[in-house]
Image: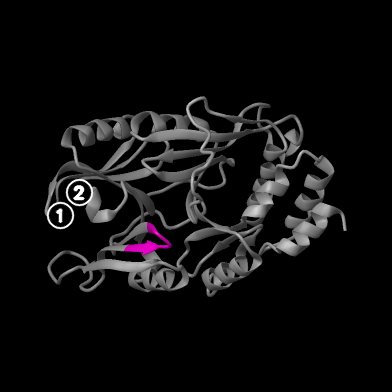
Amino acid sequence: MKTSLLLTAVVLFLGTSATSTRSQTSTLKGDSMTRITPFLWFDTQAEEAATFYTSIFKNSKLGKISRYGKEGYEIHKRPEGSAMTVEFQLEGQSFTALNGGPHFKINPSISFFVIHESEAELEILWKNLAEGGTVLMELQKYDWSEKYGWVQDRFGVSWQVSLGKKADVGQTITPSLLFVGTQHGCAEEAVKLYSSIFKNSSIAGMLRYGASEGEKEGTVKHAQFTLDGNVFMAMESGLEHAFAFNEAISFVVHCESQEQVDYFWENLSRGGDEKAQQCGWLKDRFGVSWQIVPTILQKMLQDPDKSKVGRVTNAFLQMKKFDIAALQKAFEGK
């Protein structure tokens, strides 16, 4: 874990100091900052995946694309000009995709729930997502939806698509956490913890399994909650699954101050995996990965002065939790 994240940190430095391009359709400039952003780790398919998703979802756009340069080839082994990170939006939900190598594989422990009011549009989206992918639950009528399906697409990302009303959720695409294995039975605790940590949070509802539904009675069948205005969902399953939460999908928490960095780091890391703490990354007590990132760091890494970028990079590579004052001191050469 430590080695791969250190590599990623170096790669992020090399990429931000290399070529950055923006799509012709949008720049994302002026968009309000999202406090929590899903971060998808791919081997080499980040740009291909982002381009595919923005072609099949309405109200979607590509944002900034950072590309690998000649520098650091002995570390990242990526062709010059190939995509490193890709920012994109789908139906108002912001994402970042990374080509970080084969270290982590995306799995269904975190999926994205998509609600559509048009059955025709839902079926078209399903067809596109299912092509070359794996159907986990067939698109059909279920007790909870007139039409619902769960699919893992060609890139490994899982989507739950459902016919319904957007007003019932508040957003079209919603991250959904599935608690299985050693985390089975922890969904309610996790939902309550996250809701207590983030401001402007609430729990909209929590549906539990009954005695005759094939799951442990009282465990969470479905929960919907809001963290600082971002809607999330949670479920759990006691069935045997060959996956669990990992670093392949994490959530970036954008912080404006050291106070925020300290607050989120302390509260999300408590009881988590200390070995997974490196360069702003942490894994909480449930195995979910978060990146606690000060927004000023990105500005520093994009500075045209390579000596400043080099100093701040050397500084943050030594950190677990980011220290803004130390980063600023290194940046200024003090």
**Where in the figure is residue 4, as x and y percent of width and height?**
64, 50
Instruction: Indicate the quadrant where residue 180 lies.
Output: bottom left
Q: How is the image coloured?
A: one colour
Any part of residue 45 in sight? no
Magenta-highlighted stretch: main secondary structure?
A: strand
Residue that appears at 71% across and 30% down: 69
**Where in the figure is residue 182, as x and y percent of width and height?**
40, 68
Q: Is residue 93 above or below residue 21?
A: below
Identity, as a three-letter code, of the amino acid under mark 1: Trp
**Residues at badges 2 and 1 in contact (C-beta under 8 Å)?**
no
Q: Is residue 150 above or below residue 23?
A: below
Q: Is residue 115 above or below residue 81?
A: below
Numbered disc 2: secondary structure? loop
- With 58 as the anchor, is 296 left or right in this view? right
Q: Which residues are magenta?
A: 225-230
Q: Bin the neighbour count of mark 1 within 10 Å (Cα to Cα): few under 14, some 14-19, many 20 and up.
A: few
Image quarter hosting the N terminus:
bottom right
- With 175 as the anchor, is 206 left or right in this view? left
Identity, as a three-letter code, of the amino acid under mark 2: Lys
Residue that appears at 33% across and 64% down: 225
Magenta region includes residue 54: no
Residue on which the image places disc 2: 165
Closest to the observer, 312 or 238: 312
N-term mark: 2 or 1: 1
Image quarter hosting the C terminus:
bottom right
Residue that appears at 35% across and 45% down: 158
- With 131 as the anchor, is 42 left or right in this view? right
Residue on which the image places disc 1: 144
